Image (cartoon, helix red, strand yellow):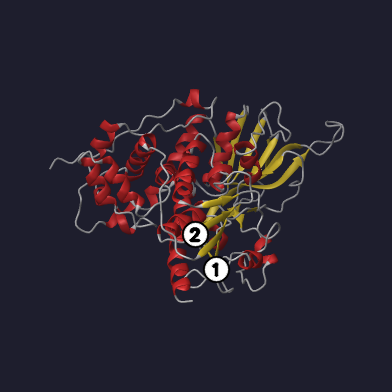
Amino acid sequence: MTVIEKRTPMIIQDADERIHNFSEVALGYDEESALKEAHRCLHCVNHPCISGCPVNIRIPDFIEKIKNGEFEEAYKIISESSSLPAICGRVCPQEKQCEANCTLGIRYEPVAIGRLERFVADLHNRNDSNNTIKREFNDHSVAIVGSGPSGLACAGDLIRKGYKVTIFEALHTPGGVLVYGIPEFRLPKEIVKKEIDNLQRMGVEIRTDIVIGKTLTIDELCEMGFEAVFVGSGAGLPRFMNIPGESLKGVYSANEFLTRTNLMKAYKEDSDTPIMKGGVVTVVGGGNVAMDAARTALRLNAEKVYIVYRRSENELPARKEEIEHAKEEGVEFKLLNNPVEIIGCSDTEDPGYGFVKGIKCVKMELGEADESGRRSPVEIPGSEYIIDTDTVIMAIGNTPNPLIRNSTEGLETNKMGGLIINEDGMTSKEGVFAGGDAVTGAATVISAMGAGKKAVEGIDKYLRNR
């Protein structure tokens, strides 16, 4: 068999065009491209790609169906394990998971598993009839807190097992980080809506504008007749560096910046909560959220966008594809640099006083490895300098919001605020389960989904043994 060494390319918007719109950058495979890429799969004996998938999709089997032109059968195989294939095909870090284990990747480029998953899901969604899916339900009801990836994955598996499922979402639109955190150009919201619609057709009930811990408590959910509760509320509490100047006007957390842009459309002229437009923007951080914030700022007509990150490019935690797209679009990376102060305008420069004028940074070099295995950045004495900037966006991570743990007796958390769970996904409070970012802190969409699916096993075991 002749091996095709390089993966089939995917059409993307030209960088000069896409920075002026929020349309999706990567346009996906057509049928010809998908068939060509599927034929690269060796269908090897051990199937190492499956072990790299947090939800254990039968990857060689769905790719084999694509080879045979059986696209709907391929979708059915994926759907056995994933409730959100069109989303995962776009935003999951396949290069660090399934594709990292691909046998073909030992010598050549690995099979583009994520692109094939996206193709199959998109084709299904285009052809889907939107008919209601009739299901038989048992006598048990489960409440899910949060409609992000872990909550949606948990809901999908529970309802397939016959449980009545109600999701409680704090915001006015379901989807969690999928709608408020990830920009339209990387994950169109119509795709998210379609995946959620599919779950609702299966019988999942979603109640929005209900903040668990404030509108209702966990205990009140139990009193309402829910026999188990899954907490998938994510990690919505932004982290800051605690450096001087972080309270200045023009300093945002990436969480606020992206939420106001993606969900509240704050960039529109008539917005009640306007956000930056134009000027120089500095994003602090090197993960996917930092890339999203930087690329969003460009689309909001920023004159210049910098990313400041304290380690080198080899240590950037963002996906390689996102880094490449950011560079193509004109984001300037200031690596081995670390902010130490945000500088405000003087009262003579700014009658309102309190706006950002610049950010003071120091240059770094890499020293010994830290606990994570990455080399620790060490400050170079006397290397301070100032970047003139109008807006600073802190994208250095999030931790779980304390609202639920503070309003619920008996919930134990770790030092980072994450809920502590046992091997079945149950918290220290009986009948209350948790997973995803609410446990681990901010992580990937697919890992959150894996946690939601794992919790289903524990919930099912708990309810059957009551």
Q: Answer with mark 1 or mark 2, whichever residue precedes in sequence.
A: 2
- Percent coordinates x, y for residue 30 in the rendering: 31, 31
- Identified by mark 1, the residue type is Glu
Q: Quadrant of residue 305?
A: top right
The label on residue 227 is 1
- Percent coordinates x, y for residue 232 in the rendering: 55, 58
Secondary structure under tag 1 reads: loop
Q: Is residue 151 above or below residue 293?
A: below
Q: Is residue 192 above or below residue 134?
A: above
Nearer to me, 153 or 318: 153
The label on residue 164 is 2
- Identified by mark 2, the residue type is Lys
Do we see residue 356 in this rendering? Answer: yes
Q: Is residue 178 above or below residue 458?
A: above
Q: Label 2 near label 1: C-beta < 8 Å?
A: no
User: What residue lies at 61% left-to-right and 57% top-to-bottom?
Assistant: 399
- Percent coordinates x, y for residue 427 in the rendering: 56, 71
